[in-house]
Every structure is written in structure tokens, then in C-alpha cells.
Image (cartoon, grey):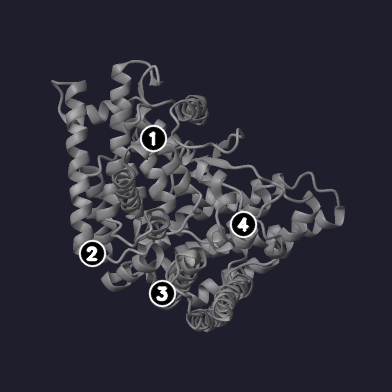
Amino acid sequence: MSSVMNARTAKETWKQQFEKVSDEYFDQVYFRYQPTQGTQVGYHQYDTQLEDYSRKSIDAEVAALKDFEKRIEAIHPEDAVADFVPRSDREIVLSTIHSRLLTLETIRPWEKNADNYSSACANGAFVLMERKFAPPDDRLRSLIAREKQMPALLAAARVNLKNPPHVYTEIAIEQLPDIVSFFEHDVPTAFADAHDPALKAEFAQTNAAVIAGLKDYLNWLKTDLLAKSNGDFRIGADAFSKKLHYDEMVDLPLDKLLEIGWADMRKNQAHFIEVAKELEPDKDTRAVLEELGENHPAPDHLLDAFRATFDGLVSFIRANHIVTIPSDVRPIVEETPPFMRATTTASMDTPGPFETHATEAYFNVTLPDPSMTPAEVEGYMHGFNVGTVISTAVHEAYPGHYIQFLWLPQAPSRVRKLLGANTDVEGWAHYTEQMMLDEGYGQPGAGARDERESKFLRLGQLQDALLRNARFIVGIEMHTGKMSFDEAVAFFQKEGYQSKEGAMVETKRGTSDPTYLYYTLGKLEIMKLREDMKKKQGAAFSLEKFHDDFLKQGFPPVKIVREALMGDDSPTL
């Protein structure tokens, strides 16, 4: 009896020890050095703090990470099924630490990416504006505190940036006019209802200083840094593999991953050609793709087009028992914030898991830039055709990211609420695009008016799948030096079925988001898990239960979800 008690006490001790150390990691390192992230998750004790990208701060973070790495590695969990959540949480926290160290010490974006600095200013302000989690005067007071730290942030950029990649500096220059405009117009408007005159006067001063600082920064980028921007954005095969292992718990060799990526792309291309022939037997596939692209809403009706999808999607999900929807509250569709527009066309911005007051979720859509020519606007809008509007609404809202967010309160631990893997987050959202159509959404009377529109919806879903296929291959090939920037743009057009405008945005993103293969990779992992669960459960398998069980795990790598659902560590691919 006493030996059982001792074993139980030992077990409780390591779990309690891990919980204590992981809590300290979040409080002393994770949010201390990423305070804007703290505001986003709902920890408002960080609202007055801003990221510090000085070399002193970076070195201090690296030292703190290494200290916590040792402390967590020294905790030895017992390999018992009953301890699965804390045991896997320990793996997640360690992987997060390893990834952050890889970023700071090896990939070194603080030394290469000018946009990180100006966008950190914008994001630091935006998270205080976007949600009214406190009275306007309180949030304005926090903003003033952050704005006072922004000149130092921009000054650190001038010290840190050494021979950055030309494309990174170009992206920063492209985004900065919107960021300046954001501080000139959007930020003051957001706090127009503040009451304290002294506070408003102080804000006028700090905001003017930020605007002047950003304009000076833009001028410096154009007249000084751009000419010195001859660096390489490629992170190399070794860092790529490590990043994938730490972020996604995927350790397949890159050549094996490329085989998987190419096979899925060829399968989707063949399916696209098949549906295109059914739709237009006498037309070339590219002509059908062009016809699909031309079938889009007017730019000024794009946001309404997305809003109009929600009722049909929710009704279908409930009627067909796809997944449990925990809330009737809808996300708010709005234009993408200025500092995100250069590298994203649509995104879901949900409140953090610990936000208790302002719980609105925003579905961001990037409208054509006013500087575009009519031809460029048309090319851009091809990416929002009748099929991809549905596919994007599924991905971002129902049953994609927004449903994930609604399930997050049921995640089993603080770690699972705060840390996640893109193969789970984006893999799920991308998986749902195909799954919904496979389950019958988009058929005449269920999301489509007739058979012709139904085929267009499938083509839109496949076009989005091919976009993710192209990301998969481009990310590996560009960052291992086997594909140039221009070759990547051409690849997105030829193999990914994207417009030139869309291909440019995607390639730019890939230069600083090397492992954006996680969409397709996660989708394939989830599809394999679903099929393996079907085999295991037979007639007892329920799609709705599978989806619910998947989502209640939080956002960990699919490897961990698989172990939770299957009870083993079988391969995810």
C-alpha cells in the first residue's frame, strides 16, 4: 500500500513541478519578451509593455530560454497513459523553447527583417484598439505607454539590421505608408471617445512622435538600407528541418516531404482538369480557370459576399452532424488591418483564450489596394471567385478557424490553450475546405444554385488546395536554394493555378514564412488520422465525434492529437 502511495506522490510531484515551471516560463519569458502576445491572449498586465528588440534584450531572452530548457528537461515524467496531457504538454513547451532559440540564434529575423520592427509598432497599438476590453481612457493610457517605447524599437532596427534580404526591405517599404496612415487616422479615431483631456493631449504628443519616427524609418529604408540589402532570405535545409521538427513535430526527410507534396499536387491538378472538362468539354483547363476567376463579386461587395455564406454553412453543419458548434455568435467581417495587407488576403482574428471582456472575433479580408490599376484589381479579384469565397469562408469561419476558437475553452490545460502547431491550426482549416464538399455541401440546394455552380465551387476548393500545394513545394525549394524568387512566382502561376498578383503575394510571404507547407501537411495528417480511426472503430465511427474529439485537444501538433485519439504513436503520414 505504501509503495503505491509513494508512486502516486512521485507522479503528482513531477506533474506539479512541471506545471510550476511551465507557469514560470509563460510569466517570466514567453510573455515578458512578447508582451503584445500577452495582450492578445487576454493577459492585460502586459498592456503597457512593448517588444524590446535591442541586442541586450535578445541576449537576455536567449539566456532565459536556455535556463528554462534545462529546468524542464530535468523533469522526468513517468511514461503512463494517465499522464498523457502533462507529458505531452512538456514536449510542447520544450519544442516551443527550441523553436524560439532556433529563430533568435540561427534564423535571426531581428537582424534581417525591417518589417518586424514597424509592424510590431502597429500590432502593439492595434491589439489595444481592436477590442474594448477596458474603458477607452484605460486602453489609451496603455497605448501611450507603448507609444513611448516605439522610438527605441525603431532605433534598435537601425542597429540590428545587417545586410537584410532585398525582398524583406521592399516589403517593409511597401507596408509602411499604410502603417503611417494607420497611426494618423485609425488610431486617433479608435480613441475619440476617451474623456480625460490631459490624457488626450499626451496621446497627441506620443502619437505624433510615432508618426514622425515611422516616416524617418521609411526614409532610412529607402535611402540607406535598401541599397545595402543584399542578404539571403533562405534559411537552409538544416534550419528548415529543425523548424519543422520543433514547430510541428514532423521529422520526415525533406526529399520525402517533397514526394508527398508533389503527389498531392498532381492528384489535385488531375481532379481540377476532370471537373473543368465536365464543366466546359471544349475548353482548355486554363480557359476554365480564367472563367472561374472572372466569376467574382465586385470589390465593394466582397465583404458582404463573405457575410452571406454564414447562414448556409451553419445550417449544413448542423443538419449533417459535421461538428458541434458551441455558440450562435457570428464573427465580424471587416477589412484586414493595414500592417497585414502585403502578405495576407484573408485571416481570422479571434480573442485570446483568457480574454473575459471583449470576445468579438474578426474575419479579416484584404480588399484591392487603391493604387492598383483596373487590370491589377481584376487579377487580384480572381482570387476571390465564387468558389474560393466559399472555400475561404469554410477555412476561416465555418467549420474552420472560428469553430476551433469556440472549442478552445475545452482544451485540457493552460499549455494547450496558449501553444499550438500550424499543422493543427491551419491543417484543420484547410482540411475542412475539402471535407465540407465531400460531405455534400456545394451541391444544388446546399450551397449552390445548380450543377454548374456546384462544379465551380469544387474548382474553387481545388484551386485553394493547389495554392497550398504550391506553398508546400516552394517553401522547401526556395529555402534550400533550389528555386529563385522569380521561379517561385512562376511556379505559383503554372502549378498552383494562381494569378500573377496572387503569386507575388504568396512568394513574398514564403520568403519569411519558410514552413508554410503546414496547410497541406496538416490536412494530410488529419485525413490519415480520420481514416485510421474509421478502421479502428468500424461501424461505430462518427464524423461529428471525430471532429469534436480532435478540436477538444486544443492546437497541439497532430502527432499529439493522434496519440490522444488512437492511443499509440503510429506515423502521422
Q: Which residue is mark 3?
A: 102
- The amino acid sitting under disc 3 is Leu
Tag 4, which secondary structure?
helix
Dot 1 and dot 2 residues touching (CB under 8 Å):
no
Q: Pick the residue in front: 394 or 406.
A: 406
Which label's residue is closer to the chain start, 2 or 4? Answer: 4
Dot 3 and dot 2 residues touching (CB under 8 Å):
no
Q: Pick the residue in front: 197 or 240.
A: 240
In the displayed structure, 270 sits above or below 40; it is above
Q: Which residue is mark 4?
A: 41
Residue 461, position as x, y percentages in the image: 32, 35
Which label's residue is closer to the chain start, 3 or 1? Answer: 3
Dot 4 and dot 3 residues touching (CB under 8 Å):
no
Can the viewer see residue 253? yes
Dot 3 and dot 1 residues touching (CB under 8 Å):
no
- The amino acid sitting under disc 2 is Leu
Q: Pick the residue in front: 51 or 150.
A: 51
Q: Quadrant of residue 163?
A: bottom left
Residue found at x 65% / y 50%: 184
In the displayed structure, 507 sits above or below 393; it is below
Q: Which residue is mark 1?
A: 391
**The C terminus, quarter of image:** bottom left
Residue 428, position as x, y percentages in the image: 41, 46
Task: Give the numbered dot on residue 254.
Answer: 2
Alpha-carbon distance for marks 4 and 3?
24 Å
Residue 394, position as x, y percentages in the image: 43, 36
Asked if residue 279 lies left or right of residue 558, the reply is: left
Which label's residue is closer to the chain start, 1 or 2? Answer: 2
Q: Pick the residue in front: 289 or 326.
A: 326
